[in-house]
Amino acid sequence: MAAKTVADPADLVKFRELQQLAYVAAQAVAHTLEPGVTERQAARRLREYLIKRGVQDWFHTPFAWFGDRTAFRGFRTPLHFFPTARKLTENMPFILDCAPVRDGYMADIGYAGCLGTNRIFEQLMDDLAEHRALIVAKVNEGVPLRQIYRDVDALIGRQGYDNRHRVYPGRVIGHQISKVHSRLPRSIAAGFGIRSLQTLVGDLIVERMHHRSPLWADGAISDHPATPGLWAVEPHIAFRDVGVKFEEILVVTSSGSAYWLDDDLPHVRRWQRTAAA
Amino acid sequence: MTSDVTGADGVRLRVHESGQHGAPTVVCVHGYPDDHTLWDGVATELAPRYHVVSYDVRGAGESGKPRGREAYRLDQLAQDLAAVINAVSPDRPVHLLAHDWGAVQAWHALTGPWLDGRICSYTSISGPCLDHAGHWFWARLRGPTPRALRELISQLVSSWYITFFQLPLLPELAWRSGLAQHALALADGATTPAVTDAVNGVQLYRANMFPRLAKPGPRHTDIPVQVLAPQRDPFVSRSLQTDIRRWVSNLAVRELPGGHWLPRTQPSTVARCTSELIDHAEGGPEARALRRARRSGPERKRFDDTLVVITGAGSGIGRATALEFAEHGAEVVATDIDQQSAERTAQLASTLGPTASAYLLDVSDGGAVEKFATLLREEHGIPDIVVNNAGIGVAGPFFNTTVAEWERLIDVNLWGVIHGCRVLGGLLVEGGAGGTIVNIASAAAYLPSRALPAYSTTKAAVLALSQCLRGELAGAGIGVVAICPGFVNTNIASTTRFVGRDTAQERATRQRATDLYRRRNFTARRAAQEILRAVERNSAIAPITVEAKVALLAARLTPGLLRALARTDITL
């Protein structure tokens, strides 16, 4: 069963290291992308990069979405999330998303990029910053997760965008993550590591008994302030056929205060550069 | 200033000059049966910025009137034109503006050997090059597709008088008896010509029609040409005037509301179009309307070079419509009572299309709308499409709706549209180039319900206004389109005032209404796409969602059923 206690500082260091590695991997693979590369090739590169660096298992295997698939256009079943033979072309946006597990620690990241230039992509990325600030502020205030979800929706509406995280299974904008303890063999079922699934299902059962959920969506079950622990939060917004997201770990302390585990991430550095300019 | 110039065969031509010496010269050539006074209105408009020249062509007005058919061949007329140009502007090329037979001879002169390097630009109204017309006829005879045959027959029917003018004596008799004058008086903008002028001019038809149409030659030009084609020209079809891309490398075509005598009925529109071409040919920037009229160059988007003004563009259908227009090439001016949200719309529109701009505007304030219109005209020009979208919602029983709530609702939903039509639509009328006014009404306009008495009243008024105005503006080539959306998922439900409920009840009702709209899930973008289509089709009423369409049908077929349903309280 998952540890329900808040991770100790040593654990947080390990979580941060793995999250850093995942983002470095995504950026490294993004750097290799060129016109003609398929989603499957990109996802494979991400997997190989991480396995070489000690990743043993996955919460979910790497995903890659190109073009209008970054906005989840035409996604009707979960099968649509899996990488396809879609080829990257000039000025096309893309998202790399992976959730590696190493030594029981888990990261879950999303990296949005663009081959060449795309005005819509740049605008979306600029506007994503407000969501990161809003989420941590609202969690800090102890606002119920369901309300924060609606606040994010309202912000998306003001910005003139679409909520695309509602396409994820369960319409989630985030989910809890914790250390993986399992005796099950390492294997993958429908893109998800079964050890991690076991952890998540365990959490689901425990939390359900407390009328809470490790999944963060806009249903009644999310009508509670964030439970202490680690949350992978992934606001995903889109305009026309371009979608962008980030996904990173939010730490909620036992007192209910919250902070982002790491600020040294590509999207945060982008906003810092823009602010400085 | 009046002077005489000697044309071909020693014919004396009476020339009139006005305007600014030293400014670019515009030479205006009138048609049949007119004289130089055709251009009086246009010349007055052009005079402040140009050197304007008009003359009576041979056989008309105070110019010489040679006898015999041979004196009226196009070659002679072209030489007359060259003589006038050389006399009034010996050192500098000129701009041509010509109408009807004047345009026919200007085409002939332009594509012949007489005016090499002497012409900068040419604006042609209702007069094709006869050689192009010959090719046009032959091409349709050789490739008789249904469309080609339709165009051919319709042109032959409107050209009956050309055949009539070939007959001996009868045409002269028609003029001298006054019959022809009666027939002519039916056309929009025609004046009664001097009988001798009318009789002399018949020779134009006899001397030129048969030779040129039977054996048309290839006549090309690289000079910038714009054709102003009146939409209701009873004599020259649009296709005949405008299907000339193979001959003219630099062509712009504008279809303008009005009849054959545009220079007389729409002098300011003709002057504006002409000066736009002149200014561009003289090295100035190309006006938006002229860019839109281009018939050469790369493929164009549906609304390229179109200026669209939208009220209430900060959210919902207004924002979605702004974005949709921008994506299809339009330059968008977004206005809203909330400046920030209008700016946001403009910012998003700029990522999809040309640069967009935003203005703060309270549509219920007539003075503010007038000030905005002045600003709009100065900074962006005359719009092509005006979308009166701004609106608010009030729901709940009639007897719970206060006077203040009624007034606010009528101020925004009805006065807002009235001011929009009056002031912004007024710009379209002033522009004289047609356009479209889009009024966002509602399915509630024809769907009675006890739940929305106040809102329905304002929207029914908007629908009635749109249909009346559509009738009034049809002649000006301005379409008025009423949009009836139905349940479109926007923030209208969450901002509607639900009267007769306390705050908590109102909040709960609002949440239920919002949920209903969300479950219906008809996006504002889909509504916007339908609005663009309605503009292109110039639909009188465009219901958007299925429920709006069904309700419109029911309102027409079974109004009693709708009245019965109106008794049920559908508010949640």
Image (spheres, rainbow, N blue to C red):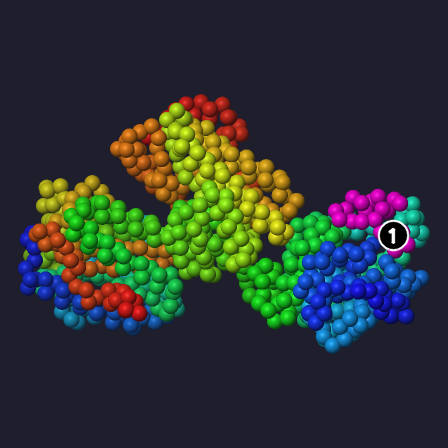
**The N terminus of chain B - image quarter:** bottom right
- Residue B529 seen in the current view: no
Bounds of the magenta segment: B178-197
Tag 1 residue: B194
| Horizontal side, residue B16 vs residue B371: left or right | right
Was residue B191 drawn as part of the magenta stretch in this picture?
A: yes
Query: A179 or B287: which is nearer to us?
Result: B287
- Residue B420 seen in the current view: yes
Residue located at (40% from left, 32% from top): B404
Q: Callout 1: 10 Å neighbours few (<14), some, many (20+)?
A: some
Q: Is residue B547 above or below residue B238?
A: above
- The location of residue A81, given as percent across then percent down, is 28, 56
Residue located at (72% from left, 75% from top): B92
Judging from the image, mark 1 belongs to the subunit labelled: B
Residue located at (90% from left, 47% from top): B174
- The location of residue B345, given as percent across then percent down, is 40, 54
**The C terminus of chain B - image quarter:** top left
Was residue B339 drawn as part of the magenta stretch in this picture?
A: no
Query: A140 or A207: which is nearer to us?
Result: A140
Residue located at (89% from left, 45% from top): B178
Looking at the rendered structure, the kind of residue marked 1 is Ala
| Horizontal side, residue A174 vs residue B117: left or right | left
Number of labels in the image equals 1
| Horizontal side, residue B406 vs residue B166: left or right | left
- The location of residue A69, given as percent across then percent down, is 34, 58
Query: A226 or A232: which is nearer to us?
Result: A226
- The location of residue B308, given as percent across then percent down, is 51, 53
The image quadrant of residue B270 is bottom right
Q: Is residue B151 above or below residue B120?
A: above
The image quadrant of residue A25 is bottom left
Instruction: Indicate the secondary structure of the residue bearing disc 1.
Output: loop
